[in-house]
Amino acid sequence: MSVAEAPPSDASGRGAAFSGAAGGDELTIVEPLIFERSRAERRAVRFPSASDTARAAGAGQPELPASVIRAHPPRLPEVSELEMLRHFNRLAHLNQAIDLNFYPLGSCTMKYNPKVNEWAAGLPGLAASHPLDPQALSQGSLELMWLLAELLKEISGFAAVSLQPAAGAHGELTGMLMARAYHQGHGEGDQRTKVLVPDSAHGTNPATATMVGYQTVTIRSNARGGIDLDALRAALGPDVAALMITNPSTLGIFEDQIDQVIAAVHEAGAIAYMDGANLNAILGRFRPGEAGFDIMHFNLHKTFSTPHGGGGPGAGPVGVSERLAPFLPSPMPVLVAGDAAEVRANARAGRSTPGAEFALDDDRPRSIGKVRSCYGNFGMFVRAYTYIRSNGDGGLRTISEDAVLAANYLRVKLHDVYDLPYDRLSKHEVVFSGRRQKREHGVTTLDIAKAILDHGIHPPTIYFPLIVEEALMVEPTETESLETLDHFVGVMREIAAQAASDPEAVKRAPTSTPVGRLDEAAAARRPDLRHRFGDVAGAPAAPAVEATGETPTA
Amino acid sequence: MLDAVGVASVEDLFADIPASVRASEWDVPPPLTEQEVRAELARLAGRNRIPEVSFLGAGVYRHLIPSVVGEVIGRPEFATSYTPYQPEVSQGTLQSIYEFQSLICELTGMETASASHYDGATATAESALMACRLTRRSRVAVSAGVNPDYRRVLETYCSGPGIEVVSVPVDLAEGGDGTTDPAAVESLGEIACLVAAQPNFYGQLEPMRELADAAHAVGAQFVAVVEPTSLALLEAPGEYGADIVAAEGQPLGIPASFGGPYVGLMAARMASVRQMPGRLVGATRDVRGRKGYVLTLQAREQHIRREKAASNICTNQALMALAATAYLTAVGPNGLREVAELSAAQARHLAGALEAAGLAERRFGGTYLNEVALRLPDAARRHAALAAQGIVAGHPLAHDEPALRDTLLLAATELTTDDDIQRLVDALEKTR
């Protein structure tokens, strides 16, 4: 019996099915959906029922009208705590993760997340703090937010920081709304309709520009992988609202003409926005605010090591120059009593400042408004603050030094076997191309990524940035040992050799993962997005697939 | 390693930063050991005062978080992985999101759900933008009964593409029932959607079916903003005609944590799925015919479509979605109903006890569920006096709506005890 036809394992009350997979001798784990484990009246948690006192006291209150009552209870799963825990633990086993595997996913900064950060975020005094508690009861949360914003200002060289945006793309949205508000404040809101974005940019940059009502103009990169200054100057004009630029770029390259880029943007009256996704490479070496950028978003989940959580939650605070500060989202944590320098100095020494008082300032008439409920992803602030204080001045500098050294080490160790379209000093990451393997052996970057899976390593980001053919974007981060890097080098060289000697073997990969290559085209053609409970005759269909189709991507 | 790279020093690795823009000295504190950093964080946590008794809700609710939920989301395979770009080694995250999508569809009575949204407010804003794309209209109507934070976020999101936001009033008159009038919708012109909340921000139950009908009568989508635990008792939005559902997922096993991280729930009709923002997981087969899960319908998304994407959203709020999935699994249908029933019973207890003691009266007619607006004389002063004793008597509504002076919004959950209510009554007695 092949695994594909295996009945849901709970039918016999057994656990997940471990069977020899068809055509292979490895063991495969098949975990049914939680709904398939459900049995009537099983449960993990019980709740008390209302007391007689409660019933009597509430007796005169209005009853729920029958018209608003639900006809059928939701079919949630009914399982014991043990069954539930085994289910999720088995699912967990199907994942690669930083805590298990090297995870050099370019652009994502998959560094180790120290566990003391989790300890801090779980402190009951912080985790149980309600965002609308009277501010007198929330002084610790407010002080933490204020201190973190102060540290981020210092690290980035910006005049002010809002912690409110919930993710990097959300920070971009916040930043571009501020750029727009700034131009409107100068009577140029209608005239400036374009946002310039290099062709190496993250997809979020042009998508953000659209969400703010701007038209995106793509600026090409030059032969060295930097932004083409002539193309930039030609595109700049009185109709340009901003340049959004990632620095170091998605090629892992520092824009070595960044001073001229900023000057040209300012000369045209536009806003210089820096996507701070790659800040991990430049801590203590380059402060974007000091260098003249007007706006930048941080990715706390990247640079400041809050866990990625399978894709979220993140946090995307924005820093701005003085002239943009009035437009920051509202409210802002502020110190309303006490001296800022004294509070900072005391916190440095681990002391509270007598008489200091924090509040949320919501009287910000020029603010773009709120971008999120409450004040942001506070739990991420706790982790980032813990991380920054743990590392401190010297530690933060070392982070960037080690991250850059690791990326350059991989560059020199692999550039003879994989093409390197931009062979320059790397910052946090290095982008190889699998074009040689594709041209000479018919082995694509997708094949190479799948082969990496068989070595227990998470593949690099692939097919991004778009300007590199068959891109393999490798970001090792500072937390990996030399042995891990050398092992990765060995694996990559072995796969390159196999691509030449036995290309079909590479194209068959992966063979050791819980499932093999999945049919993404079929998934998009006939979307199956939820469990059906076996009682739905005709499932509602999605409209026809758009012509754009699906592209393998990272 | 420096030798291998061919540089003499670490400094050489940063030679590409132009001298004119190199960082000057910064003032970042020195590093701390683990015991030192723990002391600093314990200091800050200790500066908060967690109330002994709280009736505060207003969008964020203190429910029991079963221990097993923390165990599940603490698994490093979930916490320290990333967006499942490589499905062969991400089936844990992918299957759990598929289960989340299934649970949210079941709870809401909708056909598709996504796990990408930051919170209820941004899910609401994205829902309104989605309705604009679906109807090709650029005016959005929002009931004044929607959480004021959500309305503010919605206005911010709409300001970008120049979408007009009109407010549909709630009956705040003395003796009114604190709900949205469906008859007011007709005169709003070409609206893309009507957004209304159940229960609304004031705790009142809205005539959702009539509001949905009114929206549909003018060719608009109906966006229902709901509280997820209430759906154990209340009619599913899919039943009363919602086209899009948005909700704050925090009540489902996520701590208050001073406002985040949470997860925004978003669900819709299958016919609209290609305008839905955020990551979606679909079931498929692998090369050997084995069932598996992948990110799908990615042609909607920023990394493929760039400036033509449905949204710039990149997040996949997986870990918080997993908390909601684990919570709904732990409590099951009976547990969720008990949570909703006990929350409602204690809200009735609370309102009944305060009314019986002559301390407060309900501000609105109509019906409420787990949260009730009560009027009591000199509310602001008494709220502050109780807070100083570690009792938070709900949320003063005058913050959000001047017409609701002397009105407190008090929430109950299954964690609200009879003693808590007695302590509130006693404390209010002493501030008469």
Image (cartoon, helix red, strand yellow):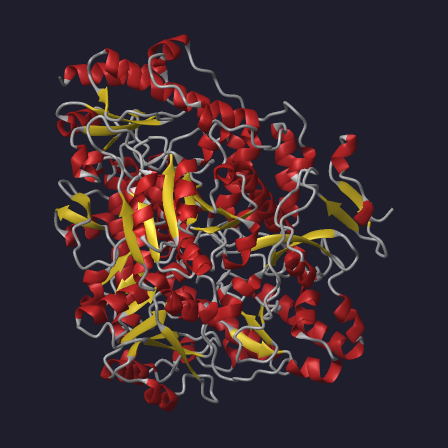
Left or right relative to B195: residue A11: right
Q: Where is residue B312 in the image (x, y as percent from the top left)?
A: 43, 63
| Residue A174, image quadrant | bottom left
Q: Position of residue A11 (x, y in %)?
A: 77, 33
The residue under the point 47% across, 87% down is A224
Q: Where is residue A127 in the image (x, y as percent from the top left)?
A: 37, 38
Q: Nearer the viewer, residue A201 or B124?
A: B124
Q: Nearer the viewer, residue A228 or B407?
A: B407
Left or right relative to A221: residue A83: right
Position above or below: B192 against B255? below
Which quadrant of the figure contains the C terminus of chain B?
A: top left
Position above or below: A81 against A413? above
Q: Which of B31 and A532 is in front in this view?
A: A532
Q: In this view of the protein, can residue A112 be seen by the observer?
A: yes
Q: Which of B431 and B358 is in front in this view?
A: B358
The residue under the point 74% across, 76% down is A499
Left or right relative to B213: residue A464: right
Position above or below: A52 against A72? above
Q: How many marks?
A: 0
The residue under the point 79% across, 78% down is A501
Q: Position of residue A551 (x, y in %)?
A: 61, 69
Q: In this view of the protein, can residue A279 be seen by the observer?
A: no
